[in-house]
Amino acid sequence: MSKASVTRVEKKQAEYGSDLVVDLMKAFDIEYAAFNPGATFRGIHDSIVNHGGNYRPEVIFCCHEEISVAVAHGYAKAKGKPMVAITHNIVGLQHASMAIFNAWCDRVPVIVLGGTGPMNTKRRRPRIDWIHTALVQGNQVRDYVKWDDQPYNLASVPESFIRGYRIATTEPMAPIYINYDADLQEDSIGEPVEIPDLTRFSTPAPMQGNPEALRRAAELLVEARSPLIIADCLGRNPRSVALLIELAELLSCPVIDKGNRFNFPNVHPLDITDGAREYLQKADLILGLDVLDIYGALTTVSKQTRACEYVISPSAKIIHISLNDMLVRSWAGDYQVLQALDVPISADTSVALPELTRLCREMIGSGGKGKTERESRLSELKAKHETRRAKWAADARATLDRKEISTACLGYELGEVIRKEDWVLVNGTANGWARKLWDLTKPNQYLGPSGGAGVGYGMSASIGAALALKESGKVCIDIQSDGDLLMTSSALWTAAKHRIPLLIIMHNNQSFYNSEEHGIEVAKFRKRPVENAGIGTHVDDPAVDFARLAQSFGVHAEGPIQRPSDLRPAIQRALQFVKEKKLPALVDVVAEPR
């Protein structure tokens, strides 16, 4: 993510503490503040709409705090800078906690602000201010935010906000939480509080890797006979995608994109993401780049017993460049298995990759050391890549004549409709068929999953991403799972309320299918009826009418679409509506789980 611009804004004099908070948001050019209204931040609410004129920030009205934070999460991934989400004291923060955890696991900077009842007990209203005031409120989320604070007085507010913004946007990025006492928000300002020159508090320069470690990594890469690159969150910095392409092409090195961000074009002949096992098995050198779970990337797991085993050779050397060790908490195991590494390098890949490539180029030399091997490897990879993609397209087309819509059919028909558009897949993959069938060529063309795998993320984060890209002319696409939307369905109202242009394609398999799959595997292992896995997982009696649900929230919708022949025309109509009206549209597609 790029550094956010910091601009001094001409403003009217702040009269109340909450005015100062809004002035800080303006100074950091924060465009939006998402929230469900609450009394403990009524001062900030008033300052946004009156002192600030509802412009930078502008209110994004949500019906649940989990939606508010997920909107800010999606926005940050698409825009490359934070927006604000505001939560109502203890109860709002509890609602928001799932979304904050998602943003934490996804290493996304979200500025979460909160309010609390007066810390001065003599100014608390009976009952409500007492049960809505915590000591200390930040304890509730401290294990999965990068930093939290509760300024003691007005003079502390600027430093607190500036520090929070800087911490959130310094790699590795993550959400932060700042809580404001109701008295601090609502009391009049006596002596003016100055906002300092923000250019002197900018995010620090990215961290470069140790020179000796980078040189050792380059030596191993150049000498390897079967090198392999695994990238995961590298694409959070869009510039890094071109850097990875340059290194991969220099070495004719195959690349696995783990997909927490867009890291590598799927049309590139060196992309082996969906044919990875063969190359993992024969790799003698593996370079990991910002891989959140490097152990998981090198192993396979039994769905029935949970047992893991390595796919790679025991003799394979492993290099990993990441900032994973810079942000670890003990509360949740998002730090994953401690994988043995031959060359561990703590660095920002956006600055480490150019140096690593330079060193590799220097070691290859003008004579082109290993040129014949690299050319042979590239030729083989290109042929297999083309064969795989042709087969996937043929397999998907073969499903178009079925009576029911397969996931491959959904991915294929949607891909054909948007092929000539400037599109961004903001959420979902149709179980991987989008990557198999579509041409993903540009940084940030796919924004990745939630990070924390919390259900309820998709619709809200898609709205945030589409909000960030609202004036870009890009078509934002959400392949929306049904169970996920049922968690936060009122997000549809926020999309309609704020006129968010978003193409929503429901992958409605009428099941919490991930849990159904687990039920099937357990039943197989225990030799019990797999048919019973649908009990407690199927959402089909009664079936949810997602089109009518969306229409009730003011979103244009049609469906359920159940026949393959009806699918493409319905998507075309919805796309036309989104483009012409610049509003959200939903197509409810009843499709097979796989």
Image: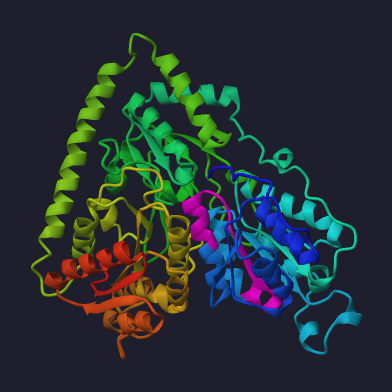
Total of numbered circles in the picture? 0
- Give residue 55's position: percent from left, percent from top: 60, 61
Please indicate, yes or no, whether residue 25 appears anywhere in the rendered image. Answer: yes
The residue lying at 30 percent from left, 61 percent from top is 579
In the displayed structure, 205 sits above or below 324; it is above
The image quadrant that residue 5 belongs to is top right
Which secondary structure is most common in the magenta stretch? Answer: helix
In the displayed structure, 130 sits above or below 247; it is below
The image quadrant that residue 586 belongs to is bottom left
The residue lying at 82 percent from left, 51 percent from top is 194
For the C terminus, which image quadrant? bottom left
In the displayed structure, 242 sits above or below 95; it is above
| 185 horizontally vs 443: left or right | right
Q: Which residues are magenta?
A: 72-94
- Give residue 355's position: percent from left, percent from top: 51, 24
- Give residue 325's position: percent from left, percent from top: 62, 44
- Give residue 198's position: percent from left, percent from top: 72, 43
In the displayed structure, 286 sits above or below 414; it is above
Q: For this rendering, which residue is in front, 269 or 80?
A: 80
